[in-house]
Image: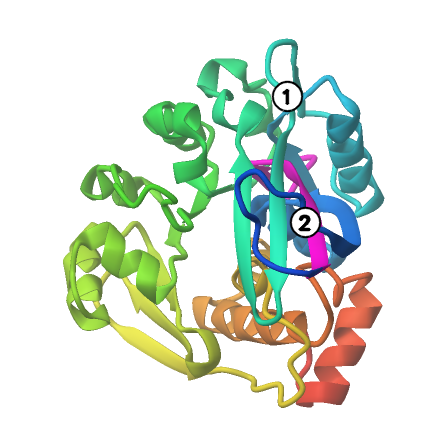
Amino acid sequence: MKRFDIAAIGELNVDIILNGIESEPEIGKEKFASDMTLTLGSSTAIFAANAASLGSKVCFVGMIGKDVFGDLVADSLYSKGVDASYLIRSENAATGATLVMNYGEDRANLTYQGAMDVMGYDDIDTTVFQETRHIHLSSLFMQSALLRDLDKVLAKAAENGVTVSLDTQWDPVEKWEMDWKKVLPQVTVFLPNEKELMALTGTSDVESAIAAVQPYLGEAMVVKMGSKGSMLVRKDGSRNFLPSFLNKEVVDAIGAGDSFNSGFISAFVAGHSLEDCQRNGNLTGAINTTAAGGTGAFSSREAAEKCAKEKFNVELL
């Protein structure tokens, strides 16, 4: 028996969220915000927290600094049911932070990568590959050392018979420097959204992007299509499009893609079919939109089940 169902390997930061900002920042001038929230950030952390709330045994592999923000990150993960014993405390780099400035329906983000950009393969306690059944990799373009060492991580997973899911997320510098033809055959399930897939492959439409990667897939890919739903593409080219579960009273969509990942992978490690995993991902993505933030709707398994039944009349896997 493995200790963990899922080991999430990815970025960690705090989010400093400013609301009620009187106007956009100007060089040399002071501006006021009327509200501030300090909370655990990062796409990978949202995934891990929500997968844990759904009942999966989850640990996190990431790097933080020996600072107050690092303490907040570690404490937040533990409070959400995620094992943080594999966290790495850097002596030389501070914990990452994202300043989120909300302006009505628009936002501007500014991120200090800090320790998340430092962690490479040699920093990881590789016993985690023996202790988990699955690893989930995310936000690679925010983690240059991890991206550089991706081959080593994937080789270690294969050596230990560990399945792998990958969500590259968006590349903030838009260079998309990843040899996906080499990487994807080593990934069990690839989880991009439409825009990310097109950018990664350098194509101008989703059909061309799917056609480009399909010969290189490990087992399957799921393309997240927002309110339209998702497209499951198997290695053999067969497809399954599944419409979304529409929420007519969306609070916000922050972390909806990460919540899709958590629902899909939680079902995957439980042994469900890819089609059932896809349905569960669509459902958890929709549940995400019923509360503020990426984890607000996933305070517990019971809360998510209640939302699934009452809002969408569907059973959560």
Q: Which residues are magenta?
A: 2-20
The C terminus, quarter of image: bottom right
Specify the quadrant of the image occupied by residue 81: top right
Q: Main secondary structure of the magenta part?
A: strand
The answer to whether one can see residue 56 in this image is no
The extreme top residue here reads: 91
Q: Disc 2 marks which amino acid?
A: Lys
- The correct choice, above or below, for 119 with respect to 243 in the image is above
Residue wearing tag 1: 94
- Crowding at dot 1, Cα within 10 Å, few <14 / some 14-19 / many 20+, comes out as many
Q: Disc 1 marks which amino acid?
A: Ala
Mark closest to the chain's N terminus, 2 or 1: 2
The answer to whether one can see residue 129 in this image is yes
Image location of residue 41, percent across then percent down = 65, 45
Question: SS of the residue at dot 2?
Answer: loop
- Crowding at dot 2, Cα within 10 Å, few <14 / some 14-19 / many 20+, comes out as few
Residue wearing tag 2: 31
Residue ID at (53%, 54%)? 108
The N terminus, quarter of image: top right
- The correct choice, above or below, for 252 with respect to 181 in the image is below
Residue 3 sits inside the magenta stretch:
yes
Which label sits in the foreground, 2 or 1? Answer: 2
